Each structure stands twice: as C-alpha cells, then as structure tokens.
Amino acid sequence: MDADEIDAGRARWQARYDAARKREADFTTLSGMPVEPVYGPPEGSAYPGFERIGWPGEYPYTRGLYPTGYRGRTWTIRQFAGFGNAQQTNERYKMILGAGGGGLSVAFDMPTLMGRDSDDPQSLGEVGHCGVAIDTATDMQALFDGIDLAGVTTSMTISGPAVPVFCMYLVAAERQGADLSKLDGTLQTDIFKEYIAQKEWLFDPEPHLRLIGDLMEYCAREIPRYKPLSVSGYHIREAGSTAAQELAYTLADGFGYVELGLSRGLDVNVFAPGLSFFFDSHLDFFEEIAKFRAARRIWARWLRDVYGATSEKALWLRFHTQTAGVSLTAQQPVNNVVRTAVEALAAVLGGTNSLHTNALDETLALPTDESAEIALRTQQVLMEETGVVNVADPLGGSWYVEALTDKIEAEAEEIFARIRQLGGEGPHQIGPMTSGILRGIEDGWFTGHIAESAFVYQQALEKGDKKIVGVNCHTGTVAKELEILRISHEVELEQRRVLAERKGARDESAVRAAVTRMIEASRTDENMIPAMLDAVRAEATLGEICDALRAEWGTYREPARF
C-alpha cells in the first residue's frame, strides 16, 4: 500500500476516533508517559500489504471493530458460573456482579444440557454437579431473582435444548415485568460443534437446524439486540484441535448458519449482527493473538464477498473468549493462576469483546468462592493495572504477529475449501458450506482430524518435546492439597422434591394442550417459538418439552467408527 493510501486511512481513523465516545481514564504509562490510541507506519511511508492490517474500526477489522479500541469501552467481564440449584447459583451471580463483573454466563448441569428433568432416571447422580439444574421457568425465575434481566447481559452455554431453555429465560423476564424487546445477551445454540466435538445433542442435525432457524427469525423480529447464536470454537479446541482447526471449523459453522438464515429468506444485514462467536484462548501466546486477528479478517471478507453483506455491523465478528480449561493441571494447581493470566492477556491483545477466566481449581471441581474471586481479579488486574487498554492492537505491525496471522488465515482457507468439497457440487438444500459440514459430521471427518491433532500433541508431551510445568518437568512441590467445592447429594433430593411439588400444583390439562400445540406447530412451517413459550408459561418441564420432540423427531446416535 502506498503512502498516500495509508495516510488517507489514518485520517479516516482519526475522524472516527475523534467522533467516538471515550472513557474518562488516564491513558498514560505507569511512569506517566502519554501514549497514542493507535500506532502505524510513519506518515508519508509506504508499507507493502498494509491493506491486510489497516486501522482499528475499518475493514478488514484485523485491528479491531472500534476506532477507540478499549479506550471507548473495555471488554465485558463475563464469568461462567453455575452449580447446585438455582438459589445457590443466584448467590454466586450476585457475588460476581457485586465484585465488578459486567455480565452473567450460565453453566447448566448435565441433565439440563441433555434436555432431561432432575427426576429422570438418567439424571441420577448428576443433578447440580457441573452446573445449575433448571427444570422449569420457575427455576429460571429463582436463578435471576433480584437481578434485572433487562439491565444485565446474560449468556447461556447450552446447545441441544437451547431453544426451550431460552423460552424459560424469556418467561422469567416476563415475570419480572421486563420489556422483552430490550433484552440483551447470547444463547449458544451451536449444534454443529456438538456433533464435531462436545456431543450434547438431542436429535438428528436437520430438526436442530429447523429450531435454530425459527429462533433466528424470532429474535430478528422480536428481540433485535439478543444474539441467538454463539458459534463456538471453544469446545473444538478443548477436544484437541489445533488453533487453525479451531478457527476454521468455527468460522465454517458460522458460514453454515449464515446460509441457514439466507435459506429462510432473512436479510443478511439484519440477522448476521446477531451471530457472535466463542473462542478458546490457549497457552501459545502469540498464536492465540494471531488467531483472533485472523478471525475478524476472514469473517469480514466472507460476509462481504461470498454472502453479500453490505452493512458494517454484518461484517463484524464479535467474540467471547474463555481461557483454556484443558491447559489446567491437577498437579500443582496454583500454577493455573499463571496460565489463566497469560491466556487472558492473549485474548485481550487479540481484541476480545468479553472474557471468562477459569479458576485454579476447575480441573478438580467447580470453583470455590475464593478461587472464583481470584479468576475475576485476574481480569481486573489486566484491565486496571497493566495499560493494555490504552492502545488499540498494540502488536499490529509486528513481523512475527503479522506473519502468524497470515499463516493461520491461509491454513483456515485451505480447510474451508476441503469442507466445501465434502458437500459436493449441489444442489444444496441450505448452502454449500452447510452441506459440507453435514457430510463431514456423517463421515467423521471433523472428529478424525481433531483426534489426530490431539494424538500428535500427546506424543510430543510423552516424548518431552512439549513441556507442562508440574506434569512432565519441575514436578517437585511444597504445595498442599486444595479444599474444593463439593455438591451435596441433598441438592438432587431437594430438586426432585420441589419438581414433584410444582408438577402437582400446575394445571395438567393446560400443560398437555400447550405441548400438543407445540408438536402440531412442528409439523408445519409455522415458527415454533410462540407455541413453545406457551408450553413454558404453563410450567411444562424441560424434559417434557424435549421428550415430546424426541417422540416426534427421534434421537441421534453417533455412527460407530474405527
């Protein structure tokens, strides 16, 4: 790019920066030295390839979505939490918000994630153990008791039964008197990554995609600020993928959901801003920063050039980051504080929009109050003490970071081409990327490549080529055993007792009629969300709703592969 084009870009950035709202803050170094809001080539200088780097707040968004970077607004501190019953988790949420957290992120227990009630025989021994138990809208009310749902952004990490759980969230907000059209937050809903990595599905892919399409339509029309899909690479990375695989599989899934929206006749400029992303931040510091920068650039180019988006917000890739759970070790767990801090810093330097930091004891159990506070304070130290919020994309222009960004982008593009080849020449019911994803799921293409990457890394660990402190090097320690959070069996007994009481007190005929009406809607092209909302209002349980849909659509069994 020649000097005149670079200087013109700088002038555009300066005008947008000057017009934007900035925080009242001290934007100097610890020693009091003033720093610029962004840095680039010297005025009057040419810089080959600068069009791929650019300026913050301008296509291709390599350097971030906003001209102010974090000077305008810092990332949202969104700590992932949930355990036991709704009342216990509500207390943790109030602690997080009271200690400076900016948003909530709900962790559900395994029965809820699989669309089962707490009194289901398959739920035995699992209620409240890896997240909070939610059976009915009344549980959702208790979960957010005393928390203004219209005033806090709420993320919910659930995919298989995401739509009925979302309906419970809406009914809880209704019962608070909230204006539903003003709700803001994110629902994960990403069913593709379940087949690829996490394996928490209910039905075959097609019925899930029908529900997701209905949700996208409903949110675009009724709750425009709410993001009905958080396309998740986190679980793909945790399953053992490389950084480039995480990026490529996640963005390919995102392109599949764009094709789903287009197949429903939705305007890409309207629904695409409602898609958000969820990435892992692992321990290779610079690789992670490069991954995040490449993600924004790829998404903007594909949305513009492949899917025809023209609005700026439709080109924006907004993402939440969680530090890598798989990097935590049971050996010398205090070391996990350091790992989490490094991973969080990489996410921030990569321009994350919100962040969850894992607690040091999460490889052993759910976090204690103390370890959860340390995880929260980790973000606050980065935000308040390190100066990383003062300059947008401070590593932009680094030869190493730019080369890594280009390399990861090139690897991702190669993977996109292979996925589209899997889908064949067409015709495609939804779109070519979606066809490739569905074929890759059916053939075990994704799981096979992830397994191979995980195997290669494990071999390197066992040979000692890759190091983990406290595991295969520096194993001596004076640390004592941690006190961990234990979920009492009484939680499950009490949840089952309360659920039985609720079932006994409700109008059974109203429940049956509402669930029947929902199934009738599923047999037509009618949007299912209103009928599902009515079932939830009648206090139909999550298990009853999901069981009715299982009876209608069947269940998914992963094919055996060797």
Image (cartoon, rainbow, N blue to C red):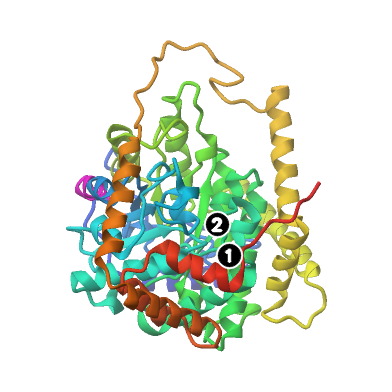
Query: In the structure shown, which secondary structural element does the residue marked by tag 2 occupy?
Result: helix
Residue 458, label in figure: none
Q: Residue at x 69, y 53 (%)?
A: 407
Q: Residue at x 42, y 10 (%)?
A: 478
Instruction: Specify whether 526 is left or right of 383.
Output: right
Q: Residue at x 33, y 66 (%)?
A: 169
Neighbourhood count class around disc 2 (C-alpha, 10 Å): few under 14, some 14–19, many 20 upward: many
In the rendered structure, which amino acid carries the disc numbered 2?
Arg
Q: Is residue 138 one of those drawn in magenta?
A: no
Q: Quadrant of the N terminus?
A: bottom right
Measuring from the top left, give residue 514's x and y in whole percent: 38, 79
The reply to whether the C-beta atoms of the residues labelled 1 and 2 are less than 8 Å apart is yes
Camera-side residue: 281 or 249?
249
Residue 112 visible (yes or no): yes
Looking at the rendering, the stretch of residues picked out in magenta corresponds to 93-103
Query: Which residue is labeled 2 in the image?
Result: 293
Measuring from the top left, give residue 7's x and y in whole percent: 50, 69
Query: Which residue is labeled 1 in the image?
Result: 297
Residue 56 visible (yes or no): no
Location of residue 135 with respect to 493 vertically, above or below: below
